[in-house]
Amino acid sequence: MTMAVKFITKNFGRYDIRSLASYMKIGGLTALKKAIQMPGDDIAALLTAAGIKGRGGAAYPMGKKWLQARDIKAAEKVIICNADEGEPCTFKDRTLIQNDPFNLLEGMIIAGYVIEAQHGYIYLREEYSYLKSILLNAIEQLTEKNFLGKNILGKKGFDYELHLCSGAGAYVCGEGTALVESIEGKSGRPRMKPPYIKQCGLYNHPTCVQNVESLSLVAAIVNDENNIYQKYGTKGEKNSIGTKLISVAGNVKQPGVFEIPFGITIRDIIYGLAGGVEGQPIRLIQFGGASGKVASKDILDTPYSYEHLAMAGVGVGSGAILVVDESTSVIDFLITTQAFFSHESCGQCAPCREGNRHIRLLLQKIKDGVHTQADIEKLNSIADIMTVSSLCGLGQAAQNALKTAMKVFPDEFKIMEEGVKIG
Amino acid sequence: MKINGVQIEVESGTRIIEAAKSLNIEIPHLCYHPDQRIKALCRICSVEVVGSKKMSAACSTYVWDGMEILTNTKKVYDTQKGILEMILANHKQDCLSCSRNGNCELQNLCMRFGIQRQTLDKAVNPVYLDDNPCIERNMDKCVKCGRCDKICRDVQGVSAITWAGRSETFKFTTAYNKPLMDTDCVLCGQCTTVCPVGAIVEKDNTQTVWEAIQDSGKHVIVQVAPAVRVALGDIFGLKKGTVVTGKMVTALKQIGFDKVFDTVFAADVTIMEEGNELLDRIRNNGILPMITSCSPGWVNYMEKHYSDQIDHLSTAKSPQQIFGAIAKSYYADKSNMNKKDIITVSVMPCVTKKFEAARPEMTSAGVRDVDVVITTRELAKMIQYAGIDFVALAETQFDSPLGEGTGAGVIFGTTGGVTEAAVRTVYEVVMEAELEKLEFEDARGLQGIKEAEVDLKERKLKIAVAHGLANAQKIMEQIKAGTSPYTFIEIMACPGGCIGGGGQPLNTTIDGKKMRMDAIYEIDSNKKIRKSHENPEVQKIYREFFGKPLSEKAHELLHTHYHKMNRRYDFSYLDES
């Protein structure tokens, strides 16, 4: 099976990212020109046929999302490109912006056409501020040539503007409602739901939030007349169509971003694409960033797809794969992950604020070998409480690694000797 | 829809917590407050909705047709109790020495869930004490429910308290953690009425009162504001809005005050001064609109936020200070006492009155007009300490000569009351004819801004009545823009006026305020004398002492002036004076 493929990455290196003319020379904007001759519903149908699920992590069917957004009637609608990419070990969106910015913006303009939005916002991760000039330049050139602005491409009433903004670097701002708060200039704390942002989002307008990778697929799908994209992927009742950008890091020899067809094995990815591990054997692999679940090396021969990973107890999430070898203990790994959430919780809701605090304290006890059976039970119950009752996705997912690690590596949580302090 | 298998019907747009209430099920909660916007922060109200793996916050989730809710499963119990234990681990738990002991929502929840021992390591936030004459903040007791933020932002439009920090350091505090005195805070104390625990409480002055009473060399007199008599009964389990004037006077005498007087008397004097000041401004091209100045929270707001418009404020002191000034002058003379031996205590529905009494300009007779201020809540504590069975008490009348008040003075306790009282007097002074209908309906009710008009022969009086500082802000912006159509404006800092004051019993909702308001008007309608200028004691004091309203002596004792404050209260001038 082919390992790395070029579909979403096909433009990489083929044009001058600072020049619209250069982008158009390799066929740029043909998708947009084609799209505006089509009814919006048909474009959404193309996305549905291609089986594209949102690439931010939640994997919501993209065509369905666009149709819902299109059906909402409002004087003003907003599209947000979520370029916050805050999940640790995730860096695929950065690669897309760095290598093919015009393609992303073309996807956003098509989205604006289908959803009938007047404004698009790119919420760029604060740490990516060095990418700002690339995007601003692209927006400026597109506006100059009337691919943005009023009556785009002569289509009466197709008015659409793009804006670029950044927050102050909080992880939680990748969460849709916190992101919207941040754009509005408020501190990035998630809103309670309902109302959902698809009905009442940025400045109370209906808002459709999409990941960079999802939007970067749009132009290629519209142009994909021979359905090449759909030839990639897994087969079966629940299948994963197409390709995926993944970012591999940790104790591998060649960390990086790869475009793969769904269905190649984890072993192919780690030992093939990423050049194998650095010496010590693999202890665990985390999928989808810090909020992702972990597996032991038993997962190596599992195909990388939505359905196979789910069966193996993990998930695609953001597309990150973190490889941890035996030089790091499971507990140390969890403490590091927990330190991240103990820092990034916004703190407003009690289960997440206090839960992260106590998980941090309990993990330290385990590391020190002074924990009791009661502590393990507490750890379990706090993790459960956070999952079911936190206000936003951060608190609901923060303990994914912990919960799966407790299942996969039960020995790591063994009690030394009840009531006796070791060491 | 169904709750625990019981079929019920509720209107669409109802939230789970309210739907459960209609089945007499109280879902546990901390951040939820029926009068406030939903926050959904504490998550203690998490319940199960059949078909959903995640739980739903009962306070923020609207019911839908066919929804099935479970509030009594193991999952609900474990989750709610687990969250409670985590919040508790972050709380100081000095219950025995906490002023909210026995009256604390966190304590109640712990009792309800049968919390017996600490299962988590305590992780309490660092101590941060914020202290001023009115409000005390103990951040190590804060449960981060956000009620203080909501009332300060939504109702008062001040936002002195807001959220800050993240994760474990998340807190509700002032900008840059400054003491309230150094912020936009006007010390209205509304935050103290909604805090579920002892994190924000009124400054307790009961000890000072006991010491004064126990000092045999002091003549300790007390005045009670009108809004206290319709609220105090709450704390002793009486129905909201029960009028307890007589029992309250009896209790104060049993506590040991030498004389028990009525602020209502002073309110009548306020009307004499303020009403005549208004006429004077109208007739002599003074600054209009004239705005009332009896609410100290409002005065602070004006001084901090609209100091350039300060001359619109009436120079008449508030009833509390007028009472104090009269007590230390007229009353001292009449009863042949040295004013330095008289201690004036006031019982107020308000925490800001503590600040007002401490103002250096409120010393017209050479000593402080009012020495100690306690709130309705603090009075209840004193009654409890004294072991008095309040409900069983017989009724007693106020003492003379400062104890006679009219219906007009009583309605000062509710929004619109000062206006109605002023109209009753101003109309008769100007028109030299009897006002036929005393009830001034346009000024009544809980609407945020009310408008009214009175036809005096020399001009039409256009009046506005506002309560809650967010509404005051709207009025002030009009004045600033030069578009204010009004001649006279009444503003009260607290929502509902003094009946909803920052010193009133806790857990008062809008319904409770309505009942208090009804009670105030009931007292008024039962009074024989309902116009301030007809109060015989007031007539007497003008005859014997002041001469007439706005006289030189009246100006000296009953009027004051205001400072422009740069949004920062500085007490250093107290030391200099």
Image (cartoon, coloured by chain):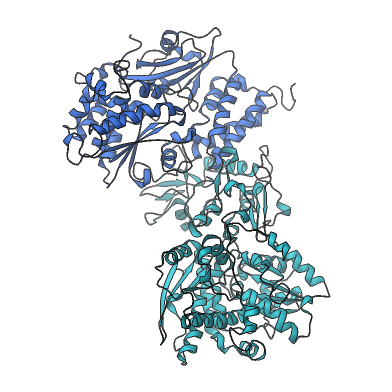
**Image colour assigned to chain A:** blue
Nearer to me, B169 or B576: B576
| Left or right: residue B354 compared with residue A69 | right
Image quadrant for the C terminus of chain B?
Answer: bottom right
| Left or right: residue A218 compared with residue B164 | left
Percent position (x, y) of residue A336? Answer: 58, 25
In the orientation shown, which residue stands out farthest toward the front?
B285
Percent position (x, y) of residue B46? Answer: 50, 45
Nearer to me, A87 or B568: B568
The answer to whether residue A110 is above or below residue B567 is above
Q: Residue B345 falls in which quadrant of the image?
A: bottom right
Percent position (x, y) of residue A296? Answer: 51, 16
> Can see residue B394?
no
What residue is rendered at 62% in x and 70% in y? B233
How many badges with numbers are in the image? 0
Q: Residue A56 falls in which quadrant of the image?
A: top left
Chain identifier of the cyan chain:
B
Percent position (x, y) of residue B384? Answer: 71, 66
What residue is rendered at 73% in x and 62% in y? B575
Nearer to me, B232 or A33: A33
The answer to whether residue A208 is above or below residue B187 is above
| Left or right: residue A358 compared with residue B70 | right
The answer to whether residue A210 is above or below residue B218 is above
| Left or right: residue B37 compared with residue A365 | left
> Can see residue B400?
yes
In the orientation shown, which residue stands out farthest toward the right?
B216
The answer to whether residue A171 is above or below residue B144 is above
